[in-house]
Image: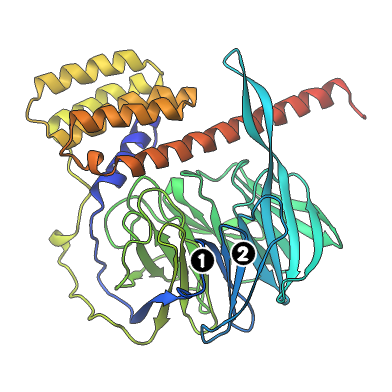
Amino acid sequence: MKHKFSRILGVAIELLSLPSITSAAAPAYKVDKSFGAQEMKAAPICVSVDAKDQVIVLLNDGTVMLYDADGKAVGNFKSAMKTPPTTMTVADGKIYLFNTDRSEKTVDFQGKKIKRMISNGIGCQVYDAAGAKVSEIKLPEAASASDAHFIGKELAIADLSKSQILYYEINGAEGKVTRKIDKVFRLCCGIFDFCPGTTPDSLIVANLGAFKVQTYTAGKKSVEFGQRGSKPDEFHGCCNPVNVGVLADGSIITVEKSPTRVKIFDKEGKSSTKITGLTELVQGCSTIPIAVDSKGSIYLASEEQKCVVKCVPGVSDKPEPAAPKEDEAVKMPEMSAGMKLIVEKCTPLMEAKEFDKAKVEAEAIMKAHPEMPDEEKAQIMMGLGIAPLMEKGDAAAAAKVIDEIKAAYPNTSLAKQADQIKKSIAGTIQMLKEAKDVSKEKAAEETKENKNPGK
């Protein structure tokens, strides 16, 4: 969304509405919800498939699980990384694990000395299938690693903290940045996902804050599609899609959260179908990592549900629904006249950070429009209450605001999902803090270099 107030309202609408949306056609897929259920003792946060269709799953405790092409567990090992890995990729029989090295530092914030966890860069350790550590690779310039893939012979890293994709040439234990894609991504909810394309030197990005899927070839944008909305070929919520994958024929798989939707587009994004039979894999703003094998089977990792769901093509376990009529398409929640007026009047005030004036204006409009439902009032009060606290980075105070709104409007969806909303807001605040810290450090480094050129 364009303005901060609208973005906050968008988060609220996404968390509170959770519509059930049906596409016009449903490809035949059998949904297996029991993949690896017996062996996984922690939540999966990443899934990859190697050249032999073996499935490798990274758990949030640093354990790596290996399965053969038939889904049989064939091994596991625990990474030796001090900070648990956040993502991985697989290439040439090796498993590459990545983490973000953080340490506690005292920083200046609004005239006060406070302690924060600051990124010191990323780490990379390489293992063989038996769990033996093969090497470590130094990867400069990146502040975080939310996703990683080999694009040809280069290693590409999604750096959420700096909103960029870095390409590395790997030479032994050293990685050298050869190029980057930056200043083009609108990221949200602490999520940044991409996958290799099927054409040489291409990758596909889930630019979720822009509601776009973008293909970059040789570092330049070559294909783009997507927009916000509730139609089958649009992306719903405050930000989607969260993850992307690709089939052998170049078709692009998109994954949306809240509600979970998995759709298959042609490579130009001109048509789409939706996989049926999936239940909710996450609530609120969370990633759903995806991998695809050579047979077109789709693997979805849900950290929240602690499972990997396998979607096998060719046999549907549910009948395909009839294509809905145009007028039956599910729409985003309709705003009342009062709600529309509040968004119109208060957005400029929120943009100008005149939060008190925005609150007075909104309260006057709500008083003049007593017909406004409690759902909308709760959303408005949340947006007004949280915006200044997000500016301050005060997650604890934001959680208190949610509790107060829950008490004032106990029968609303916000009240029922208060814990999920608090978790989502806390994650967003943390992401914003880290981004600000990285920007400050970069500015300080540039200032130092300017004062001491050549050193």
Q: Residue at x 32, y 69 (%)?
A: 278
Q: Nearer the viewer, residue 327 or 280?
A: 280
Q: Residue at x 50, y 85 (%)?
A: 295
Q: CA distance from mark 1 to mark 2?
A: 9 Å
The quadrant where residue 62 appears: bottom right
Which of the two marks, 1 or 2, is nearer to us in this view? 1
Q: Nearer the viewer, residue 94 or 306?
A: 306
Question: SS at mark 2?
Answer: strand
- The three-letter code of the residue at mark 1 reads Lys
Q: How far across and how far down the image is residue 231, in percent?
A: 27, 58
Looking at the rendering, in which quadrant would you find the N terminus? top left
- The three-letter code of the residue at mark 2 reads Thr
Q: Residue at x 30, y 51 (%)?
A: 229
Q: Which mark is residue 235?
A: none
Residue where numbered disc 2 is placed: 63
Residue where numbered disc 1 is placed: 41
Looking at the rendering, in which quadrant would you find the C terminus? top right
Q: How many other residues sit within 10 Å of disc 2, few (<14), some (14-19) or many (≥20)?
A: many
Disc 1 and disc 2 in contact, CB within 8 angstroms: yes
